[in-house]
Amino acid sequence: MDVVKKIKESPNIRWFILANVALGTFMATLDSSIVSVALPTMSDEFKTNLGTLQWVVTAYLLTISSLLPVFGKLADILGRKRVYSTGFIFFTLGSALCGMSANLWMLVSMRVVQAIGASMLMANNQALLVSAFPLHERGRALGLNGTMVALGALSGPALGGVLVGLMGWRSVFYVNLPIGIIAFLVAQVILPHDLPKHEKIKFDSTGALLFAVGMICVLYAINNGQAQGWGSPLIIGGIVIGILLLSIFMRFERRITDPIIDFDLYKNKPFLIGNLSSFLSFTGQFANTILMPFYLQQILKYSTTQVGLLMTAFPLAMAIIAPLSGYLSDEIGPMILTTGGLITIASGLLYLTTTTAHSAFWMIFPGPLLMGIGAGMFNPPNTSSVMNAVPKNKLGIAGGLNALVRNVGMVVGTTLSVTLFENREASLLANIQHPSASQTVSAFMTSYHTVMLVGAIIILIATAVSINRVVPPHNGEQF
């Protein structure tokens, strides 16, 4: 008990809070990347195709995206410690039940439970850090947390491969159990009790339902439009119903006292600019994320080990640069770093337009490396700028919205890149009845370069948006 008391009374308690938040961030990010490695093994056990099995990933992503603002707002009402700690319970319980799943649809259902917990964690990690750290240290705290995002993405495929090989696919879920239990217990000790002063605020359950269902419909349609056909009734219906529900949601929110999303936040220029540039940056980055493995394996005939090495360049660079960028943003503000970061990402994408069907390993490596450096430069100061622009009683919803735009950017970027690539490739081969191997490779490379160019243009648009940010006074004051 004396140790617990000393930790709580320590002037460095904020660093213990950072460690706990970083653990939650690592766990949620790790689970996004570790499961993909286990899909082929799951397919064999459940005797199903990869198209159906994709729901193991899709259900997780859709649930998180639809609930981020909801749990951000709920934390502003009930307290961040309560919602964040509950996230560990849901995530750990969901992980255990995923590992025990007897069939595919039980697994998908338990992934939803797991995703509910992940959304509670992701919606509140930024708010917890901003509340714990003074203004002049927030950048480095957010930068270190960004490193955990990169490390989670970096270690997921490798750790997943080892676990599946040694203990089977269920182990990729069981690995979360000790992490989740420890993180929950630590959260009970170190996170401050932060019950809001205004406890009479009512939770907008109608708005939460409208938003969640609307987002699920729209994101499902965007995510599956290319595979099922953009003209299919299911995709058209998803888009129409989703937009209708979100339109009703927006009108409903403007008429009530305590909305899920306070749209007045978007009248705040640093908040608006930061979120918009974040959305565009993730959209542009994911032009390469989904296509590079196909280029490396199908065109260059690289082994999975070589592909893994090249793909780790991005998260490894980000893991190194993010804390440095966060530290510098506390000293010089976000403008130079966010602008430089976006330009560096665009440079990486433009560099990849020079690759060929015969490029050597060392000739490709600078592309993802530059993108990782740029992402590490951009993300921490941009997040710090966004979160510093809102009052303390709205940190939860601000963090939830900031996480949401990143997730939506990833979905839109993935869909845009695949759609553009396939349509461009089809048009190049349309008038060739029996394309030769060289013609197929040429069409692939032209299409790949087109997508990289479009991604770079999107990043440059993000740069133009980002340089218009107004930075709040950097006076070192806490809320």
Image (cartoon, grey):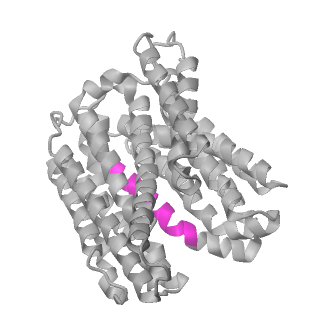
Residue at image point 57% right, 73% down: 158
Q: Give the residue at the far right of this rendering.
A: 102
Quadrant of the rendered image containing residue 256: top left
Residue 244 percent across, percent down from the top left: 49, 26
Residue 153 sits inside the magenta stretch: yes
Quadrant of the rendered image containing residue 93: top right
Residue 398 percent across, percent down from the top left: 38, 32
Residue 189 in sight here: no
Closer to the camera in the image, 455 or 166: 455
First to last magenta residue range: 138-157
Using the image, determine if residue 305 lies above or below residue 32.
below
Residue 33 percent across, percent down from the top left: 55, 62
Residue at image point 48% right, 31% down: 243
Closer to the camera in the image, 18 or 208: 208
Residue 341 sits inside the magenta stretch: no
Q: Quarter of the image containing the C terminus?
A: top left
Q: Main secondary structure of the magenta part?
A: helix
Q: Quarter of the image containing the N terminus?
A: top right
